[in-house]
Image (cartoon, rainbow, N blue to C red):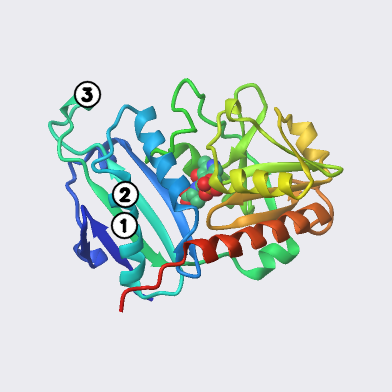
Amino acid sequence: MPSAVMLNGTLCAPEQATISVLDRGFLYGDSVYEVIRTYGGVPFELGRHLQRLDESARRIGMALPCDVATIEAEVWGAHEATRNPESYLRVVCTRGSGEISLDPAVARDPQRIVIAQALNAPPQVVYEEGVRVALVGVRRNLKAAIDPQAKTGNYLNSVLAFGEARRGGFYEAIMLDHRDLVTEGASSNVFAVFGSTLVTPPLEAGILKGVTRTVVTEVASQGGLQVLNLPLTESALLSADEVFITSSIREIVPVVAIGETEIGREPGPIYREVRRLFGAYVKTYIANHYVAPRP
Ligand code: PDD
């Protein structure tokens, strides 16, 4: 399945898409990014993703290299260039390069990159049987250090947490903060279910404002379920009736064990209901945003 890269507005084969080793994205993770998937060839919630890209850039005092509408067109263009039915899409904007210095003011020539690859969605068994996740030792970055609400290229916090989980044979890492409160997964948000109430940590917990988290909150609330943003302790999470994680690529994944603690033997009824509501939302979204590919 082919991949395509749009580098500063020019379509190129991935092996020809190169940027300077002096780029600050490479040197410092001084960049912002988004990951989007398509459904029926439509980049899902592209507007919300690009709004978050813009907000991430503002949070680190970086200007996007161009307007959001240009990036939007490039995302569609990169997907169409692959001719794949569905894409994994990654948008990266860096602060650029210059003299090697921490000073952001020396940065010139910001880069923008859209990578489109064939979507590699999780296998069906993940949704049918659920996954085991780990509460890892790596703590989530402090909001006052590198705010997790900015989706920056500086992802070592998540890389280390995920590595710890994978070494233990777990599907995802769940991170606590310095106060022992639950934050989020290495690349997902966390929901705990108590009765028919969904609880997910608030943004103040130091988490990414996940687009899937937002959509799940909206569809669940419209579907008559209560959704609360509340601090979640480790023991509350472990005692939940159901737990699931959300992300753009994995959508909603049921969790059946956290470390050695079982959380229900199989994906629960609230998970199944939220998944149904989410599926219906996606269908409507595609119908409202479909654009026929150019011949
Ligand atoms: N990551 N939290 C973190 C730390 C994430 O990296 C992600 C997504 C999420 C979920 O956000 P969303 O629902 O907007 O995808 C939460 C993407 C998928 C990634 O970096 O690959």
Disc 3 vs disc 2: which is toward the camera? 2
Residue type at mark 1?
Ala
Residue type at mark 2?
Ala
Q: Secondary structure at mark 2?
A: helix
- Residue at the disc numbered 1: 73
- Residue at the disc numbered 2: 69
Is residue 174 positioned above or below 120 on the image? above
Q: Residue 199's quadrant in the figure?
A: top right
Instruction: Please report whichever mark, 3 or 2, sits nearer to the chain's N-terminal start.
Output: 2
Disc number for residue 234: none
Residue 175 in picture, x, y percent from top left: 61, 36
Q: Residues within 10 Å of mark 1 (few under 14, many from 20)?
A: few
Mark 1 to mark 2 CA distance (whole Å): 6 Å
Residue 218 in picture, x, y percent from top left: 65, 45
Residue 162 in view: no
Q: Secondary structure at mark 3?
A: loop
- Residue at left 20%, top 39%? 96
